[in-house]
Image (cartoon, rainbow, N blue to C red):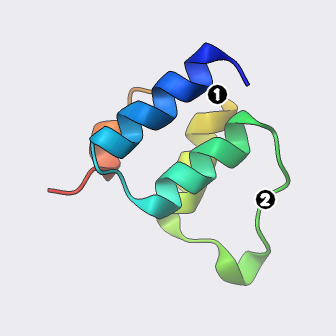
Amino acid sequence: MDQTYYEAVTKMEQMNCSEEYIQGWQGGYLQNPKREEQRVTEDYEAGYADGENKDTSNFGNHAAA
């Protein structure tokens, strides 16, 4: 892992982002295979796409209110 990964995960945890979003982001960032279809959620999909693109700008959209 690189420093960017750790900083992003720490930021998501501090912002209290959805667990599903965090797991998706981690999987996408690390280029892991996606979950099986029945376990995929909207937050997971969004996180996976952001992780693949190494995009940290959408964290606020998935943070607890």
Judge left or right: residue 25 versus residue 32.
left
Q: Position of residue 19 (x, y in %)?
A: 46, 61
- The residue singled out by tag 2 in the image is 34
- Label 1 – label 2 distance at C-alpha: 15 Å
Q: Residue 26 appears in which quarter of the rendering?
A: top right
Residue occupying image coordinates x 14% and y 56%? 65
Residue occupying image coordinates x 64% and y 72%? 40
Give the residue type at disc 1. Answer: Asn
Q: Position of residue 62 (x, y in %)?
A: 33, 51
In the current view of this chain or complex, which residue is farthest to the right?
A: 33
Q: Secondary structure at mark 2?
A: loop
Number of numbered markers: 2
Q: Position of residue 20 (x, y in %)?
A: 51, 62
Residue occupying image coordinates x 48% and y 28%? 8
Give the residue type at disc 2. Answer: Lys
Residue occupying image coordinates x 80% and y 74%? 36
Earlier sequence position, callout 1 versus callout 2: 2
Determine crowd level at label 2: few under 14, some 14-19, many 20+ residues with C-alpha closer than 10 A.
some
In the current view of this chain or complex, which residue is farthest to the top?
A: 3
- The residue singled out by tag 1 in the image is 53
Seen in the picture, residue 40 relative to 12 is either above or below; the reply is: below
The disc placed on residue 27 is: none
Residue 55 seen in the current view: no
